[in-house]
Amino acid sequence: MEIKQLLLNRFKEDPLYKYLVTKRDEEELFPVSVITLNVAGRYSTIDVARILDRNDNDVRNIMKLLIKDEYLVDSRVGRNYKLDIYDVYKIFLANLICSKQGFNYTDVKFALGLIQDVHKGKNTPSEVASDIEHDFLLNTQTIQILEAKIDILNAKNLELSRNLLKLYEFAQKISEIELQMFGSTSNFRTHSA
């Protein structure tokens, strides 16, 4: 069986492959460096770096993250990794996502379904619509609460205005009484001392 067909059969339901198949050409998903690998071969990180045309430290870093996220099985023999063609292809898929400008390993985590889309915030239009509806309801409730508080403040302001008017009327009456008692509008305290 041809390597490309073997990989297609194995990866047709793979989350990284499904993520990339809609974004990349088929040629990019099956480069010559991958489809010419030996099915029975075992590959080191240096071999994978050469296949992907990447630095072996970059390959090791991607591998560690893929192992941590349980997408890749830790296939170390002693201190060295021995990877089969399927492991190499998994690393290739993750590398392909990370190699797009503006993308990084967080995008791989999204493709694996471990986090929500970091670029859009939500995975589906219905989730986005649901969030918009939720935000609208919260904003409407907030507006209603603020309007109620404004009504309360307006009522208190009216009451305060009425009380100030009464205070002014009392001050006016006191001035009139002072005028009657002392013949002038001078301060009451000065005359009582």
Image (spheres, helix red, strand yellow):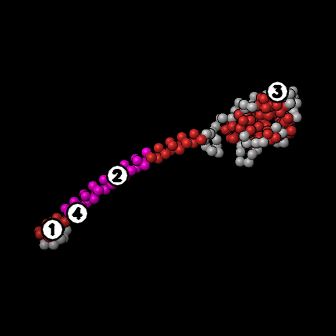
- Identified by mark 4, the residue type is Tyr
Label located before the other in sequence (1 or 4): 4
Residue 29 sits in which quadrant? top right
Give whichever of discs 1 and 2 has the lower sequence position.
Answer: 2
Q: Residue at x 84, y 42 (%)?
A: 53
Mark 2 and mark 4: Cα distance apart in space: 25 Å
For residue 151, the mark is 2
Q: Is 53 on the left or on the right of 21, as rendered? A: right
Task: Check disc 2 and report its element: helix, strand or loop.
Answer: helix
Label 2 or label 4, whichever lies nearer to me, is 2
Kind of residue sitting beneath label 2: Asp
Which residues lie in the magenta part? 141-170
Instruction: From the top left corner, tell me how far across and down residue 141 is, in percent.
Output: 43, 45
Q: Residue at x 25, y 60 (%)?
A: 164
Magenta segment: does it hold 158?
yes
Tell me if residue 80 can be seen: no
**Dot 2 crowding, Cα within 10 Å, few <14, some 14–19, many 20+:** few
